[in-house]
Amino acid sequence: MESSSPRIVAFCCDRSGYVAADMAGQLGMALPVGLEIIRVPCAGRIDALHMLQALENGADGVLIVACHEENCQSLTGNLRAKARMGYVHGIMEKIGLEKERLEICNLASNDGAKFAETVRKKSEDLERLGPSPIK
Amino acid sequence: MIKVEQKPVDEILDFLEPYNKILLVGCNACVAVCHAGGEKEVGILAAALRMARKKLGHKLEILEDCSTRQCEPEFVEELREKVKSVEAVLSIACGVGVQTVAGRFSDIAVYPGVNTQFMGETTELGVWVERCQACGNCVLHLTGGICPVARCAKQLLNGPCGGSQEGSCEIDKEIPCAWQQIHDRLKAIGQLDRMAQFIPAKKWGRESRDRGPRTIVREDLKP
Amino acid sequence: MKSGSNLEKILEKGLFAVTGELGPPKGNDISVVEKKAEFLRGYVDAVNITDNQTAIVRMSSIAASSLLIQRDLEPVMQMVTRDRNRIAIQSDIFGATALGIRNMLCLTGDHQSFGNQIDSKNVHDLDSIQLIDCVRTMRDEGTILGGEEEVEGQLRIFIGAAANPFGDPFEFRVIRLAKKIHAGVDFIQTQCIYDMNRFKEWMQMVRDQGLHEKVHIMAGVTPLKSAGMARYMNKNVSGITIPGELIDRMAKAPKPAEEGIKICVEQIEELKEMEGIHGVHIMAIEWEHKMGQITEEAGLLPRPTVS
C-alpha cells in the first residue's frame, strides 16, 4: 500500500446514500482515497454478517449511509440497520475492535455535501485511530 | 422449539485457545429460528472469532458448515470429511446437536458454542419465552392450555401461592402469575370448576428427568 | 382430638386462641431461641417456628421447635415445600412428632430468589395442598403417601395452613381455602391484615360457603414500627398490601412505634368480634418483647389453661 489512507467501506442505499454519493462525485467534491462504495437497495439489506465481513476483509472503518430515520422508503430498513449495528458493536467490544470504526449516517438523496463531509471526517477519525488491529 | 443463546465470545475463545483449525457447525432447525445457531450466525461467529484471534496474533482457521438438523445421524455424518481435517469442532447447535456430533466423531473434542435455555414460543420477533419443561406427563388439559410446571416458578399444581399479586409472580412484576393466567383462561372456556379440583403430586421420580435419562422406543418404526 | 395439643384444645373448646411467632437464628446460637421464647411465654397458646423464611438459611424449624418443647412451650412447626422432597418431608414429620411436636403449618415457601442462597434448586415435589393431603394421610390412614407402607407408630398432629385473603386472583382465594379444607386442614392462619375492608369481604365469602364452620380460622396481625416499615412491607413483601391511610397514620404519628401497637390492638379488638374468627396470630417480628403489651392491651390475658 503506497499511502496509509484508511480503507472505508460505505454501504449506500439506493434511495439516499448512493444518490448523494453520486452527486458528490459529479460535483467534484473531494472524497478520501480509501473509500469503497457498496450499493444496496436499502440499508435494511445490510446484515450483521456484511458489517463483520467488511471488517474482516480489511476495512479500517465501515459506514452505513441511509435515509433519515423517519424517511426510509421501505419504512424501517434504516432502523433495522441501526439495530444490527448495535449488535455488531457488542461483538466488536468483546473481540477488542474499536466500536467507532462502524458508524451509521442518515442523510437525504440531495445531500451530496453531507456525504462528502461525512466520509472526509471518517477518514480523519480513522487516521487518528490507526489501522484496524486485525489487518 | 428449543431456544438457545450464544455463549459469550470470550468463553468460546477460551475453549479454542489450543487450536489452530476448527470446524464451526450450526444447525438449521431450532437454533436458526432463534437466531443463535443457524447458517448466518455461523458466518457472524466465524468472522468474530477469526478477527479476535488475528488481533491476538494467533490465527484461527475456521471451516464453516450448517447441518439440516444436528440431532440426526444421517445429517451429522455429512460432516465427516471436514471433521477429519480439523483439530476440534465448535457446534452452535443445541445441547442435543453437540452431543450427536461428539457421539459420532468420538476421537475429536466437540465444544458447545451456545447455552441451551428452554423449549419455548416466539411471542414476537426477537422474544422467546419458556413454555415447556418436558415433565413427561402433560397436564395442559387441566389448566386451560397454560403449563404450571414451566410457567409457575414453584411448579405448583393447585393454584397460586400467596405471592401472586395483581397478576404478577412474586419474583418479578414483569413475570405473569401462571395461576392467574390459568384461572382467567379456565373461566373464559367455562371450566373454572377445575380450579377447585385437587391435583395430586406429580410422579417426578417416575415420569420426569429425575428418573434418569429418558428414552422413547417405537418398535414399529425400527428398521 | 387429633393431636391433643394445647392449641387444638383451646380452639375445640371455642376459646379465642392466640399464637405468636419466632424466627430461629441464622446459625446454631440457642440463646437467640431462648430469649425470643421467653418474651412470648404466658402470652400465647402456641408459638409458630418459621422454616427458612424468605429463603434465608436459619436453624431448622424442627430443631427450634424441639428446643421450645424442652422449655415447656408449645410450637407450631412451619414446613415449606420449597426445600425438601416427599421423602424428607415425611421423614421430618416422623421425627417431629417423635420429638413431641403436635402442630404443623403446611406452606409453599417464598421463592429462593428472595433469600441468601439464590443459586439453590427449588424442590416443590409437593405443593402446600398436596402436603396437607400427605400429612392427613399419614395421620388418619396410617400410611405414607401412596398407601404402600404403614407408619410404625401413630402420628398425632394438628394440621394448619396459611391463607392469604389479599392475594390474587381474589375470587379464587376462597376456593383455595375450600381446597385446603378438603385436603384435610384443621386450622388456618391468615397473612397479616392491614386492609380490614378487604379482609371483611373475604370473610363474608368464607361464611357464605360455610367454610368458617369447617376449619378454625385465626387472623394474622403484625404491629407496624414505622411508616418506613409500612412502605417497605407494602412494596417488597409478597402477599402484603397496606392501605395508604394506615401508612399516613404512621407517618403523622408523633410516636410511630406506639401508634403501631395501638393500631394492632384496635385490629385485634375488631377481629375478636368477627364471626368465624377463632383466634389471632400475632407476628411481632423482631419485636417479640412487645407481645406482653399487645396481648394485655387487647384483653387477651391471662391465657387459659386447658386439660
Image (cartoon, coloured by chain):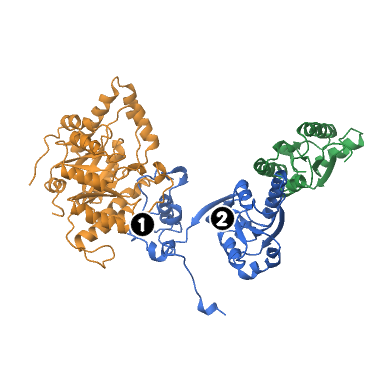
Within 10 Å of the Cα at label 1, are there few (<14), some (14-19), or many (20+) other Cα atoms? many
Q: Is residue C83 left or right of residue A85?
A: left
- Viewer-nearest residue: C208 or A65: A65
Quarter where residue A103 is shown: top right
Q: Measure the C-alpha gap from mark 1 to mark 2.
A: 26 Å
Establish whether labels 1 and 2 are both on one chain.
no
- Viewer-nearest residue: C219 or B149: B149
Chain letter, orange: C
Within 10 Å of the Cα at label 2, are there few (<14), some (14-19), or many (20+) other Cα atoms? many
Secondary structure at badge 1 equals loop
Query: Which quadrant is home to the N terminus of chain C?
Result: bottom left
Q: Amino acid at mark 1?
A: Asp
Quarter where residue A30 is shown: top right
Pinpoint the chain carrying mark 2: B
Q: Looking at the picture, how far across and down is residue B179, in whole percent?
A: 40, 51
Image point 36% across, 34% down: which residue? C233
Chain letter, green: A
Pinpoint the chain carrying mark 1: C
- Viewer-nearest residue: B197 or C231: C231
Up-down: is C278 above or below C129?
Answer: above
Count all numbered tags in the image, as a single digit.
Answer: 2
Q: Looking at the picture, how far across and down is residue C246, in whole percent?
A: 32, 29
Residue at the limit of the structure toward the top, as seen here = C254
Quarter where residue B138 is shown: bottom left
Q: Can residue C277 be spotted in the picture?
A: no
Q: Which residue is mark 2?
A: B3
Q: Is residue B18 left or right of residue B180?
A: right
Q: Can residue B90 be spotted in the picture?
A: yes
Q: Which residue is mark 1?
A: C125
Q: Which color was chain B given?
A: blue
Up-down: is A45 above or below A32?
Answer: below
